[in-house]
Amino acid sequence: MRIEKSVLAGRQGKADIEVSLNPSEKSIIEVNLESSVERLFGNHVRNNIQSYLADLGITSCTVRAIDDGALDFVVKSRLDAALFKLNSVFLDRLSCGKKKLGEKFTDFRRTRLYIPGNNPYLMEGCGLFGADVIILDLEDAVSQDEKVDARFLVRGAL
Protein backbone atom coordinates (compact mmCIF):
# COMPACT_ATOMS: atom_id res chain seq x y z
CA MET A 1 0.00 0.00 0.00
CA ARG A 2 1.26 3.47 -0.88
CA ILE A 3 0.40 6.65 0.96
CA GLU A 4 -1.47 8.92 -1.50
CA LYS A 5 -2.01 12.07 0.60
CA SER A 6 -0.58 13.68 3.72
CA VAL A 7 -2.19 13.00 7.09
CA LEU A 8 -1.41 14.01 10.68
CA ALA A 9 -2.13 12.19 13.95
CA GLY A 10 -1.20 12.80 17.56
CA ARG A 11 0.07 15.93 19.20
CA GLN A 12 3.23 17.37 20.59
CA GLY A 13 3.40 16.89 24.33
CA LYS A 14 5.02 14.99 27.15
CA ALA A 15 5.04 11.21 26.54
CA ASP A 16 3.34 11.71 23.17
CA ILE A 17 4.27 11.81 19.50
CA GLU A 18 2.98 13.72 16.50
CA VAL A 19 3.13 11.62 13.33
CA SER A 20 2.76 12.91 9.80
CA LEU A 21 2.53 10.42 6.91
CA ASN A 22 3.36 11.86 3.49
CA PRO A 23 3.55 10.42 -0.03
CA SER A 24 7.00 9.49 -1.31
CA GLU A 25 8.50 8.88 -4.75
CA LYS A 26 10.95 6.36 -3.27
CA SER A 27 9.84 2.80 -2.61
CA ILE A 28 11.03 2.82 1.00
CA ILE A 29 9.70 3.97 4.35
CA GLU A 30 11.72 7.04 5.28
CA VAL A 31 11.50 8.27 8.89
CA ASN A 32 12.48 11.83 9.87
CA LEU A 33 12.52 11.91 13.66
CA GLU A 34 12.80 14.89 16.00
CA SER A 35 12.96 13.57 19.55
CA SER A 36 13.84 14.73 23.04
CA VAL A 37 15.20 11.22 23.63
CA GLU A 38 17.01 10.95 20.28
CA ARG A 39 20.38 9.96 21.72
CA LEU A 40 18.94 7.16 23.85
CA PHE A 41 16.02 5.80 21.86
CA GLY A 42 16.15 7.40 18.40
CA ASN A 43 17.13 4.22 16.56
CA HIS A 44 14.53 2.19 18.45
CA VAL A 45 11.73 4.62 17.58
CA ARG A 46 12.77 4.72 13.89
CA ASN A 47 12.97 0.92 13.68
CA ASN A 48 9.63 0.59 15.50
CA ILE A 49 7.91 2.91 13.00
CA GLN A 50 9.48 1.26 9.95
CA SER A 51 8.77 -2.31 11.04
CA TYR A 52 5.18 -1.55 12.11
CA LEU A 53 4.34 0.13 8.80
CA ALA A 54 6.04 -2.68 6.87
CA ASP A 55 4.00 -5.27 8.82
CA LEU A 56 0.83 -3.41 7.80
CA GLY A 57 1.81 -3.56 4.14
CA ILE A 58 2.94 0.04 3.67
CA THR A 59 5.69 0.08 1.03
CA SER A 60 6.34 3.75 0.35
CA CYS A 61 5.98 6.86 2.50
CA THR A 62 7.83 9.56 4.36
CA VAL A 63 7.13 9.75 8.08
CA ARG A 64 7.81 12.91 10.04
CA ALA A 65 7.65 12.26 13.78
CA ILE A 66 8.04 14.75 16.62
CA ASP A 67 8.55 12.67 19.76
CA ASP A 68 8.75 13.61 23.42
CA GLY A 69 9.29 10.24 25.07
CA ALA A 70 6.31 8.27 23.74
CA LEU A 71 6.06 4.59 24.63
CA ASP A 72 5.82 1.96 21.89
CA PHE A 73 2.04 1.54 22.18
CA VAL A 74 1.60 5.31 21.79
CA VAL A 75 3.70 5.34 18.60
CA LYS A 76 1.73 2.44 17.12
CA SER A 77 -1.60 4.00 18.13
CA ARG A 78 -0.70 7.27 16.43
CA LEU A 79 0.31 5.40 13.26
CA ASP A 80 -3.00 3.48 13.35
CA ALA A 81 -4.94 6.73 13.72
CA ALA A 82 -3.10 8.30 10.78
CA LEU A 83 -3.78 5.29 8.55
CA PHE A 84 -7.43 5.26 9.62
CA LYS A 85 -7.73 8.94 8.65
CA LEU A 86 -6.38 8.00 5.21
CA ASN A 87 -8.78 5.11 4.71
CA SER A 88 -11.47 4.15 7.23
CA VAL A 89 -11.55 0.60 5.81
CA PHE A 90 -8.17 0.21 7.50
CA LEU A 91 -10.04 -0.26 10.80
CA ASP A 92 -11.42 -3.59 9.55
CA ARG A 93 -7.88 -4.98 9.44
CA LEU A 94 -7.44 -4.09 13.11
CA SER A 95 -10.77 -5.43 14.36
CA CYS A 96 -10.61 -7.90 17.24
CA GLY A 97 -14.07 -9.35 16.64
CA LYS A 98 -17.49 -8.75 18.14
CA LYS A 99 -18.14 -7.72 21.71
CA LYS A 100 -19.27 -10.36 24.16
CA LEU A 101 -22.72 -9.64 25.55
CA GLY A 102 -24.49 -11.17 28.48
CA GLU A 103 -21.62 -11.30 30.97
CA LYS A 104 -22.92 -10.50 34.44
CA PHE A 105 -21.28 -8.08 36.84
CA THR A 106 -20.62 -9.69 40.24
CA ASP A 107 -18.31 -7.34 42.19
CA PHE A 108 -19.11 -3.97 43.72
CA ARG A 109 -17.25 -0.97 42.35
CA ARG A 110 -15.68 1.07 45.11
CA THR A 111 -13.36 3.50 43.35
CA ARG A 112 -13.11 4.65 39.76
CA LEU A 113 -10.32 6.62 38.10
CA TYR A 114 -11.20 8.50 34.93
CA ILE A 115 -8.30 9.24 32.58
CA PRO A 116 -8.65 11.30 29.40
CA GLY A 117 -8.19 8.93 26.46
CA ASN A 118 -5.94 11.35 24.61
CA ASN A 119 -3.29 11.75 27.31
CA PRO A 120 -0.64 8.98 27.35
CA TYR A 121 1.30 10.76 30.10
CA LEU A 122 -1.49 10.09 32.60
CA MET A 123 -1.96 6.49 31.38
CA GLU A 124 1.59 5.52 32.33
CA GLY A 125 1.09 5.90 36.08
CA CYS A 126 -2.62 5.20 36.45
CA GLY A 127 -2.00 1.98 38.41
CA LEU A 128 -0.29 3.90 41.21
CA PHE A 129 -3.53 5.17 42.70
CA GLY A 130 -5.05 1.80 43.61
CA ALA A 131 -8.39 2.35 41.92
CA ASP A 132 -10.65 -0.66 41.48
CA VAL A 133 -11.61 0.52 37.99
CA ILE A 134 -9.66 2.62 35.50
CA ILE A 135 -11.83 4.28 32.87
CA LEU A 136 -10.16 5.66 29.76
CA ASP A 137 -12.61 8.45 28.94
CA LEU A 138 -13.34 9.22 25.29
CA GLU A 139 -16.45 11.35 25.79
CA ASP A 140 -16.23 14.67 27.64
CA ALA A 141 -12.50 14.59 28.31
CA VAL A 142 -11.54 14.52 24.61
CA SER A 143 -12.30 17.28 22.12
CA GLN A 144 -14.10 16.36 18.90
CA ASP A 145 -10.98 17.01 16.79
CA GLU A 146 -8.95 14.46 18.77
CA LYS A 147 -11.52 11.62 18.98
CA VAL A 148 -9.96 9.39 16.28
CA ASP A 149 -6.45 9.77 17.70
CA ALA A 150 -7.71 9.06 21.22
CA ARG A 151 -9.60 5.91 20.14
CA PHE A 152 -6.46 4.37 18.72
CA LEU A 153 -4.42 5.46 21.74
CA VAL A 154 -6.88 3.74 24.10
CA ARG A 155 -6.90 0.65 21.87
CA GLY A 156 -3.11 0.53 22.05
CA ALA A 157 -3.13 0.98 25.82
CA LEU A 158 -5.53 -1.92 26.27
Image (cartoon, rainbow, N blue to C red):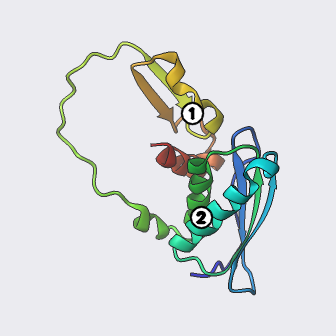
Q: Which of 135 and 66 is in front in this view?
A: 66
* Mark 1 residue crowding within 10 angstroms, few (<14) / some (14–19) / many (20+): some
Q: Which residue is drawn at 76% across and 48% down?
A: 40
Q: Which residue is drawn at 57% across and 73% down?
A: 54
Mark 1 belongs to which amino acid? Met
Q: Residue at x 79, y 60 (%)?
A: 33
- Of tags 1 and 2, which is closer to the observer? 1
Q: Is 24 displayed left or right of 141 in the figure? A: right
User: What whole-number distance in Å separates the C-alpha atoms at marks 1 and 2?
Assistant: 24 Å
- For residue 85, the mark is 2
- Asked if residue 109 can be seen in this view, the reply is yes
- For residue 79, the mark is none
Determine whether label 1 and label 2 are within 8 Å by CB.
no
Quadrant of the frame with the C terminus: top left
Task: Return the residue at label 1.
Answer: 123
Q: Percent position (x, y) of residue 79? A: 61, 60
